[in-house]
Image: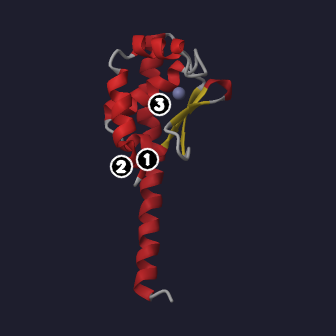
Protein backbone atom coordinates (compact mmCIF):
# COMPACT_ATOMS: atom_id res chain seq x y z
CA UNK A 1 0.00 0.00 0.00
CA UNK A 2 1.32 3.44 -0.90
CA UNK A 3 1.19 5.92 1.94
CA UNK A 4 -0.13 9.38 0.99
CA UNK A 5 3.02 11.25 2.13
CA UNK A 6 5.37 8.88 0.42
CA UNK A 7 3.32 9.19 -2.75
CA UNK A 8 3.57 13.01 -2.56
CA UNK A 9 7.28 12.70 -1.92
CA UNK A 10 7.77 10.42 -4.89
CA UNK A 11 5.79 12.85 -7.06
CA UNK A 12 7.88 15.78 -5.80
CA UNK A 13 11.14 13.95 -6.40
CA UNK A 14 10.11 13.02 -9.89
CA UNK A 15 9.12 16.65 -10.62
CA UNK A 16 12.48 17.84 -9.31
CA UNK A 17 14.30 15.28 -11.42
CA UNK A 18 12.38 16.38 -14.52
CA UNK A 19 13.16 20.01 -13.69
CA UNK A 20 16.87 19.33 -13.36
CA UNK A 21 16.72 17.35 -16.57
CA UNK A 22 14.94 20.15 -18.44
CA UNK A 23 17.45 22.69 -17.14
CA UNK A 24 20.32 20.52 -18.26
CA UNK A 25 18.78 20.06 -21.67
CA UNK A 26 18.58 23.83 -22.13
CA UNK A 27 21.72 25.01 -20.33
CA UNK A 28 23.69 21.92 -21.26
CA UNK A 29 22.89 22.34 -24.89
CA UNK A 30 24.32 25.88 -24.82
CA UNK A 31 27.47 24.99 -22.94
CA UNK A 32 28.18 21.77 -24.85
CA UNK A 33 27.29 23.51 -28.08
CA UNK A 34 29.82 26.25 -27.36
CA UNK A 35 32.47 23.69 -26.39
CA UNK A 36 31.87 21.65 -29.51
CA UNK A 37 31.91 24.82 -31.66
CA UNK A 38 35.16 26.11 -30.19
CA UNK A 39 36.95 22.79 -30.62
CA UNK A 40 35.44 22.18 -34.05
CA UNK A 41 36.80 25.54 -35.23
CA UNK A 42 40.20 24.81 -33.70
CA UNK A 43 40.30 21.37 -35.38
CA UNK A 44 38.84 22.51 -38.68
CA UNK A 45 35.74 20.32 -38.28
CA UNK A 46 32.14 21.23 -38.96
CA UNK A 47 29.49 19.19 -37.17
CA UNK A 48 25.91 19.77 -38.37
CA UNK A 49 24.90 20.62 -34.80
CA UNK A 50 24.64 19.43 -31.24
CA UNK A 51 21.74 17.67 -29.57
CA UNK A 52 21.50 16.91 -25.86
CA UNK A 53 19.27 14.03 -24.90
CA UNK A 54 19.09 10.78 -22.97
CA UNK A 55 21.57 8.39 -24.57
CA UNK A 56 21.22 5.57 -22.06
CA UNK A 57 24.67 4.22 -21.26
CA UNK A 58 26.59 6.42 -23.69
CA UNK A 59 28.00 9.86 -22.91
CA UNK A 60 28.01 10.90 -26.51
CA UNK A 61 27.59 9.70 -30.03
CA UNK A 62 28.27 10.94 -33.51
CA UNK A 63 25.22 10.37 -35.67
CA UNK A 64 24.17 10.40 -39.26
CA UNK A 65 24.60 13.71 -41.06
CA UNK A 66 27.44 14.68 -38.71
CA UNK A 67 25.18 15.50 -35.78
CA UNK A 68 26.79 15.21 -32.35
CA UNK A 69 24.69 13.82 -29.52
CA UNK A 70 25.47 14.17 -25.84
CA UNK A 71 23.83 12.60 -22.85
CA UNK A 72 22.20 15.35 -20.76
CA UNK A 73 24.22 14.05 -17.78
CA UNK A 74 27.44 15.11 -19.52
CA UNK A 75 26.83 18.60 -18.14
CA UNK A 76 27.05 17.19 -14.60
CA UNK A 77 30.61 15.98 -15.22
CA UNK A 78 33.59 18.17 -14.31
CA UNK A 79 34.09 20.65 -17.16
CA UNK A 80 37.42 19.22 -18.35
CA UNK A 81 35.84 15.75 -18.57
CA UNK A 82 32.77 17.04 -20.44
CA UNK A 83 35.23 18.74 -22.78
CA UNK A 84 36.89 15.37 -23.39
CA UNK A 85 33.49 13.85 -24.28
CA UNK A 86 32.90 16.73 -26.74
CA UNK A 87 36.32 16.39 -28.41
CA UNK A 88 36.00 12.58 -28.51
CA UNK A 89 32.74 12.88 -30.47
CA UNK A 90 34.19 15.55 -32.76
CA UNK A 91 37.05 13.20 -33.71
CA UNK A 92 34.41 10.67 -34.75
CA UNK A 93 33.57 13.06 -37.60
CA UNK A 94 36.92 11.96 -39.05
CA UNK A 95 37.00 8.41 -37.83
CA UNK A 96 33.73 6.65 -36.94
CA UNK A 97 35.40 3.76 -35.12
CA UNK A 98 37.88 3.43 -32.28
CA UNK A 99 40.79 2.57 -34.57
CA UNK A 100 44.43 3.39 -33.70
CA UNK A 101 44.05 6.35 -36.09
CA UNK A 102 41.08 7.60 -34.04
CA UNK A 103 43.13 7.62 -30.80
CA UNK A 104 46.10 9.24 -32.59
CA UNK A 105 43.87 12.04 -33.84
CA UNK A 106 42.30 12.42 -30.42
CA UNK A 107 45.74 12.68 -28.81
CA UNK A 108 46.74 15.38 -31.29
CA UNK A 109 43.55 17.31 -30.52
CA UNK A 110 43.79 16.79 -26.74
CA UNK A 111 47.24 15.63 -25.59
CA UNK A 112 46.05 14.68 -22.08
CA UNK A 113 42.94 12.86 -23.28
CA UNK A 114 44.02 9.56 -21.72
CA UNK A 115 44.01 11.05 -18.21
CA UNK A 116 40.48 12.39 -18.76
CA UNK A 117 39.32 9.14 -20.34
CA UNK A 118 40.58 7.18 -17.32
CA UNK A 119 38.87 9.58 -14.93
CA UNK A 120 35.61 9.05 -16.77
CA UNK A 121 35.99 5.27 -16.71
CA UNK A 122 36.70 5.38 -12.97
CA UNK A 123 34.23 8.02 -11.76
CA UNK A 124 31.65 8.27 -14.51
CA UNK A 125 29.55 5.71 -12.68
CA UNK A 126 29.04 8.16 -9.78
CA UNK A 127 27.40 10.57 -12.19
CA UNK A 128 25.31 7.72 -13.56
CA UNK A 129 23.75 7.46 -10.09
CA UNK A 130 22.02 10.86 -10.53
ZN1 LIG B 1 33.88 6.95 -29.42
Residue at the location (46% across, 53% down)?
21
**Could you tell me which secondary element the residue under label 1 belongs to?**
helix
Residue assigned mark 2? 126
Q: In this view, does 7 lie above or below 14?
A: below
Mark 2 crowdedness (10 Å alpha carbons): few <14, some 14-19, many ≥20? few
Which residue is tagged 3?
33
Whichever of labels 3 and 1 marks the residue nearer the N terminus, that label is 1
In the structure shown, which secondary structural element does the residue marked by tag 3 occupy?
A: helix
Task: Give the CA separation, mark 1 to mark 2.
Answer: 17 Å
Q: In which quarter of the image is the C terminus?
A: bottom left
Residue ID at (56%, 44%)? 55
Residue at mark 1: 24
Count of number-bearing discs: 3
Q: Residues within 10 Å of mark 1 (few under 14, many from 20)?
A: many
Q: Which of marks 1 and 2 is in front?
A: 2
Residue 79 percent across, percent down from the top left:
32, 34
- The answer to the question of whether label 3 and label 1 lie on touching residues, with beta carbons closer than 8 A, is no
Q: Quadrant of residue 10?
A: bottom left
Q: Is residue 3 above or below residue 106?
A: below
Amino acid sequence: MIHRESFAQVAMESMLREGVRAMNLRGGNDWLGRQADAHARRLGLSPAGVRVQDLGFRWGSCGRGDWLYFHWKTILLPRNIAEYVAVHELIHLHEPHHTPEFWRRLERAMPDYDQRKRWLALHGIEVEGV
